[in-house]
Image (cartoon, helix red, strand yellow):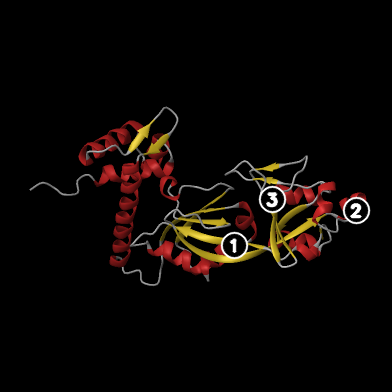
Amino acid sequence: MARRFDHLGDVEAFVTVVEQGSFTSGAITLSTTASVLSRAITRLEVRLGTQLLRRTTRHLNLTEAGHDYLEQARAAFSLIDDAERAMRGREGTLTGRVRLSVSTTYGHFRLPEKLARFAVAHPHVKVEVNIANRNVDLVAEGYDIAIRAGELPDSGLIGRKLEDATLQLVASPSYLKRRGVPQDIDDLVRHACLPFIMPSTGKPAPWLFSVEGKNLDWVPEGDIQVFDDVLGVVSLAEAGAGICQAYDFVVRDRLERGRLVTVMPKVAGRSRAFSLLYPPHRNLPIAIRALIDFLVE
């Protein structure tokens, strides 16, 4: 009788190569060679009768079938992990690995305190955090959870709101002394605004105002534009380069120390939501479920 699952090593090779981003990195992780992993994935594709990866000299891209198979394979390995933990009798000790993608603002100012408390509660869970201002493909890049600002994408992912973060318009005392204090939105066109260019669109992120109870999205223009890291606009504003809009939790300490001053508070009051996104796995691994519940709390 033929063994039903003698190809699991090939499945592990496929998952590892995708998560590590290359055959070379996958080979280092599994203590083997890139050629061995390449042959393993080829065998798996022959077994399944479909192509899982498109290989080029520099990139690996999942096919549609590869996306689907990767998600199912991860779910299956997670079930095996859960079963092994149960058999070891380690009740009360949570183990596992979670890969988390988060933007710079939340990653630097909100997430650290939450993760520190999670680490105390679950010291055997390994959390890998990627802090960057780009929208990752959770499935293709091997992330379990992402934290993102703004409207939730219509992507089939599950979204759970973490908070509504209040926005403020701020500038340094030295800038306001030099250029004057704007009184309304029309005054802003005569000031040095510090726009952040959104990676997804290549356009300035609009500033969100509330004017006489009505929401207004206003697009800033300025000679200095910040790309990639939105925290750059706050550093520039603190240095006296102009006016920026930022989350209250980012600038609060600078406001308390007098490094920044709130500008035009009457048009403030708008907020932007931060949400937790994750794929809709039927059998979500225990460690991932625990971190999701912890962050949402």
Which of the numbered marks, if any, corresponds to residue 231?
A: 3
Q: Is residue 173 above or below residue 38?
A: below
Tag 1: amino acid: Ala
Label 3–label 2 contact, CB within 8 A: no
Tag 2: amino acid: Gly
Tell which of 204 and 139 is nearer to you.
204
Q: Quadrant of residue 147?
A: bottom right
| Earlier residue among tags 2 and 1 | 2
Residue extending farthest to the top is 57
Q: Is label 3 or label 1 in front?
A: 1
Label 2–label 1 contact, CB within 8 A: no
User: Could you tell me which residue is drawn at 31 percent across and 69 percent down?
Assistant: 89
Query: How many numbered marks have been drawn onto this rendered protein structure?
Result: 3
For label 2, count other residues whose C-alpha is less than 10 Å away and answer few (under 14), some (14-19) or many (20+): few
For label 1, count other residues whose C-alpha is less than 10 Å away and answer few (under 14), some (14-19) or many (20+): some
For label 3, count other residues whose C-alpha is less than 10 Å away and answer few (under 14), some (14-19) or many (20+): some
Which of the numbered marks, if any, corresponds to residue 121?
A: none
Residue extending farthest to the left is 1
What residue sits right under mark 2 in the picture? 180
Residue 55 image point, x, y percent: 37, 31
| Earlier residue among tags 3 and 2 | 2
Label 3–label 1 contact, CB within 8 A: no
Tag 3: amino acid: Leu
Q: Is residue 191 shown to the viewer in this render?
A: no
Q: Secondary structure at mark 1?
A: strand
User: Could you tell me which residue is drawn at 74 percent across and 60 percent down?
Assistant: 168
What residue sits right under mark 1 in the picture? 273
Residue 13 image point, x, y percent: 32, 42
| Earlier residue among tags 3 and 1 | 3
